[in-house]
Image: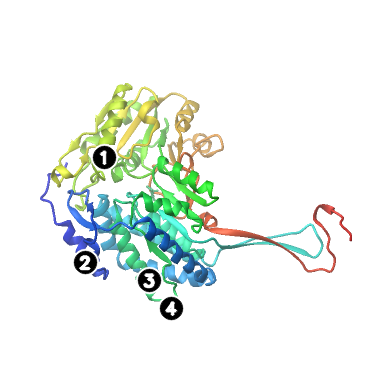
Amino acid sequence: MNKPEAPTSLSRDVAAFFAELGLPAESLSQGSTEIRSPINGEIIARVRFADAAEAKAAIGRSAEAFRQWRVVPAPVRGELIRQLGNELRAAKEGLGRLVTIETGKILSEGLGEVQEMIDICDFAVGLSRQLYGLTMVSERADHRLMEQWHPLGPTGVITAFNFPVAVWSWNAALALVCGNPVIWKPSEKTPLTAMATTALFRRAAARLDNIPADLVTLLIGGRDVGEVLVDDPRVALVSATGSTGMGRIVGERLARRFGRAILELGGNNAAILCPSADLDLALRATAFSAIGTAGQRCTSLRRIIVHGSVYDSFVPRLKKVYDTVTIGNPIDGSTLVGPLIDKRSYEAMQKALEAAAQAGGKVHGGKRVKGPGGDDAYYVSPALVEMPAQTGPVLNETFAPILYVLRYENFDEALALHNGVPQGLSSAIFTTDLRESERFLSASGSDCGLANVNMGSSGAEIGGAFGGEKETGGGRESGSDAWKAYMRRVTSAINFGHALPLAQGVKFDI
Ligand code: UN1
């Protein structure tokens, strides 16, 4: 474990990056909401929150931007995203570091998050020339059927603290090439990375002519601002990432007004460790998925279901990793585990561990450790909990590094445990047995949106559709055909003949 180091002046770093981006120094001291770095609890900014009236006005401006943007050809819209990708490339160091300062994830992951933004920009640029509709054969002579995809409307994007900018970019890059303006409400805990990203977007937009003002609006605010986005019928689509509790409210309220939703909510991701697994590989993959990002990814590994024949060779090795992993300042290159985001998160972790112990779990680790920041920072050793059964806190997502270990004897039992939780985001199997891996990926296998073989549950690339089932909300973002959620489909029938045959052979002669 790292020795505690003297706290650095993170606010100075933040101010320097903001100056580099041309953001006024006052933007860091404009308001009364204190933003603290989880690294040492230092106040790095005081930001102003928008209120509901400002949010409404912003939606009006976004609706105006939509009228202009929807008629810009999609490949021209793609050029804006190409410019955004270039800005992100140039600012990768600084923005990655700011992600680390604001979220506490290690620098390599802060940089990785910006890389994920660059990757989705590249994807979206290509996509801007591939918003394909279909043509279908018609049952009627001299008729043609076709579908087109048109821009949908202002898109609200509500993001969580743990991926403060990448998740915005998955949504924004697609929404923008699809012809929609974006209104962004970032997590209350991470407004600074959102401000910096918006500044980079403005730089990109300034390189081109005729980009409508208010194409991207940043609304830093609380729940009231989120509610305006969810309730206002001018917002055609809301993409929300966060807890299942939040998503249930957002989903219900959107449904009431027939607004569209993309929900990316809690995960309770598991891996099955089979008798034939490559244990060395499984150990590394488990460590990254369960301990990495201090367990604060929606894809973090939360359960491992281990076959009895490998339990005693695998679990003690895993415990050793848990005992020796480097915890400390995430800016320091040798650290693997940074702090939790805040005190509430620490308390939720302790509560879950107590409940697990009460349910018969054997808890290993999970204690507060001294980091670089004194009392206002929350560093913990990751926790491994051997459970006698899948009960109590094992059924919930606790956003902290807790890995529950369960034992199984036959594969069907493992699958039942795997799927026996309310969430369905990500999943993994470690096996070299083709039958097991194919079964896991089949209709009677993992019930999650993401199912991996011989790798952990976290760290997806942007090329595939990202999201999950059940209480994870069903939304898909990022790659594959996720773009379709940001557009409206028009199906057209065209008669190029002289007769008027009716479908299904109906006669209606006048
Ligand atoms: C999240 O935690 O909300 O698959 C997103 C991953 C990352 C994204 C996580 N690419 O772990």
Which residue lies at the image location 54% right of the left edge and 71% below the top edge? 71
Name the quadrant containing residue 9: bottom left
Q: CA distance from mark 3 to mark 2?
A: 21 Å
Which residue lies at the image location 41% right of the left edge and 43% below the top edge? 246
Residue 25: mark in rendering: 2
Q: Secondary structure at mark 4?
A: loop
Q: CA distance from mark 1 to mark 2?
A: 30 Å
Observer-side mark, 2 or 4, equals 2
Q: Secondary structure at mark 3?
A: helix
Percent position of residue 237, x then y: 50, 55
Percent position of residue 370, x then y: 15, 40
Which residue lies at the image location 44% right of the left edge and 73% below the top edge? 211
Choose between 259 and 454: the one closer to the eye.
259
Three-letter residue code for mark 3: Ala
View extreme (bottom): residue: 209
Q: Are the residues flagged by discs 3 and 4 in contact, CB closer than 8 Å?
A: no
Q: CA distance from mark 3 to mark 1?
A: 37 Å
* Between discs 3 and 1, the one toward the N terminus: 3
* Between discs 2 and 4, the one toward the N terminus: 2
Estimate how packed mark 2 is, as few (under 14), some (14 to 19) or many (20 or more) residues with alpha carbons within 10 Å. few
Observer-side mark, 3 or 2, equals 2
Which residue lies at the image location 32% right of the left edge and 50% below the top edge? 161
* Between discs 1 and 2, the one toward the N terminus: 2
* Between discs 3 and 2, the one toward the N terminus: 2
Please name the residue that numbered disc 1 is placed on: 344
Residue 283: mark in rendering: none
Name the quadrant containing residue 299: top left
Please name the residue that numbered disc 4 is placed on: 209
Three-letter residue code for mark 4: Asp
Percent position of residue 155, x then y: 47, 58
Q: Secondary structure at mark 1?
A: helix
Choose between 217 and 329: the one closer to the eye.
217
